[in-house]
Amino acid sequence: MPKLIIDHIPVEVPAGTSVLEAAKSMGIWIPHFCYHPALGSVGACRLCAVKMLDGPVKGIQMSCMLPAQDGMVVSTTDPEAVKMRSLVIEWLMTNHPHDCPVCDEGGECLLQDYTVAGGHGIRRFEGRKRTHVNQDLGPYIEHEMNRCIQCYRCVRFYQEYAGGSDFGVMGSARRVYYGRFEEGKLESPFSGNLVDICPTGVFTDKTARFRARYWDYEMAPSVCPWCSLGCNTVPAARYRELLKTMARENPAVNGPFICDRGRFTNAPVNDLARPRVPLVDGKEVPWDAALDTLMVRIAELGELYGPGSLAVVGSPRLALEGNLLLARLAELLGAGNLCYFADREEGERVAAAVSLLTDGNAASMADVRKADCVTIVDCDLRDEGPMMLLAVRQAWRNGAPVFLVGKHSPLEQARAVSIEAIELSILEEAPLGIFERPVVICGTRNNTPAAIKILARADARIACLLPGPNAFGAGLLAREHGAVSLAEAMASGKVKGILAVEADIPADVLARVPLVVAADWLPTEAVRRAQVVLPTAAWVEADGTYVNNEGRAQRFRKVMAPGLPIRGLPARYHASPDKPAPFHPPRVHRSFPPGGELRPAWRFVAELVERLGGDAVTEPFEGRWELLRELDPEGGGVRLGE
């Protein structure tokens, strides 16, 4: 391991570490644009200049391109290096527009930070600025090419890291242009990462354009709920409206990126048609009245149809806290059926995956990225878990062969196979034992439980894509409490009432029971048909925990206060020429009605438990779940079941 000195501080780093990375590991920040931990270095921006005072190399050098070597003496504060960096900033600002007041990147712009830090404030060049024509890149990405500093981050990510082919670099010298050959929506399912990866404001989030400044946002560490992978995110909200979602780095899960589904699916949270107030028979009522009615009708159901006539139903998208307390609620209600899955086959597939992955062989996305062989069994990664597709690409880029097995693979050469053929492919055609870090990826949407169980015989780590953000947690609880699927419960003919908590239940099932109670934040079919509706808080409106597809429990925090977004309020609350809107945040919350009281699902379940004589619930995690009480949302999560 090379030993060197940076700014009078000795440091020892692994071989292959650049001087820039070595300095960063010590807390010494060297300005840079083109370097990115996931993309490496190209030496394009010339901003990371340092002075080599002694050692095998001397003079001004680009720290991102220089591997650390024994005997190096590096200065990041030498006047010559500081002057070099200040001149680079001045060159970049020669053509850069002075539009910081109207640029959405303002407040989180590296060029802005480095320009101020370098002391540049006067433009000495008197010539005309070079200008470009912007392109329409679709509904999500705003293009402002005049802000470009030619760092090549965007094209390196889009083409090399993500495998896109419809976006690239054109031109040469000062005419370099980043875009498409013709205008149109970017085709990559990871195009939104251009917003995060661009160090200036060339690519910004069009869905949140001109809505707020970085310092105006309400933000908190969160977890994406739109598939089972559990990618870490930072949602940004203002005035009770989710404006945008940014990637939050977790090396064990998503790394520094997220997919477009996780980034741009904000509409359901902001939907004015969301359940926002309790309803009884279609009429708005206070929370206490709704809960009183619920208790009365459940009691009437038991008197009319006898014990076992109620099914309490959780779901793979309900946070772990709510699913945990549903078991206690079902016990106190004397419900004959506790269900975590509506569909029988889905429940069996998840149960098979949970049994398979609790033996310590679960593969994280980090394991997939480092794998030297990947076998994909009967799943469409782009649909079931887009970020897993990105992880597989990194393994392929590093030389790992990729085997595709199954009739639902999106590639034409994939074969339609039976369970026996899957067994043959995993155990014989792709002899995984000859590899050091093999991974098998299995979808649960199209595979049978028997096919999933076969994977236990593979000499490899396993990654199963599940049907929801907390499907693994629901599978663990179903196994622990002996829960059945709702389809199995309905087959008995005894179920006459359904209490659905953030559960997606088919309309034909709901039509077969006289009592439906729905607690949800989405306007589902159960909510539309329910006699009693209880509005719950979305994941950005409450604290909670999801257990992702590998069994990793991850905490998410409340981002914004629940309630009606300002843009959805009646016209009398909007600004007018003689009555400006009160845009000062403290006044907003007093001047605008919240639009209903929304509670986390587990809170209302806890209240029902107390009404039924159970102990007061202040903390859902008890018994073997106590390790999750102090789970740090910034800590990367903890694996369960191993």
Image: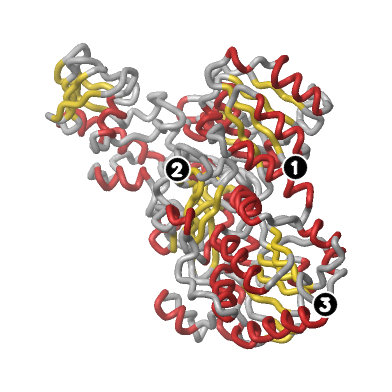
Q: CA distance from mark 1 to mark 2?
A: 28 Å
Colour pattern: secondary structure
- Does residue 184 show up? no
Image coordinates for residue 357, horizontal then vertical, percent = 59, 37
**If you read the primary sequence from the N terminus, does the residue marked by circle 1 or circle 2 appear first?**
2
Q: CA distance from mark 1 to mark 3?
A: 36 Å
Question: Within 10 Å of the Cα at label 1, are there few (<14), some (14-19), or many (20+) other Cα atoms?
Answer: some
Question: Within 10 Å of the Cα at label 3, are there few (<14), some (14-19), or many (20+) other Cα atoms?
Answer: some
Q: Which residue is mark 1?
A: 445
- Does residue 456 show up? yes
Q: Which residue is mark 3?
A: 305
Image coordinates for residue 49, horizontal then vertical, percent = 27, 28
**If you read the primary sequence from the N terminus, does the residue marked by circle 3 or circle 2 appear first?**
2
Tell me the quarter of the image containing the N terminus: top left
User: Quick check: 613 left or right of 423?
Assistant: left
CB contact under 8 Å: marks 3 and 2 = no
Q: Which residue is mark 2?
A: 249
Q: Indicate the secondary structure of the residue bearing disc 1.
A: loop
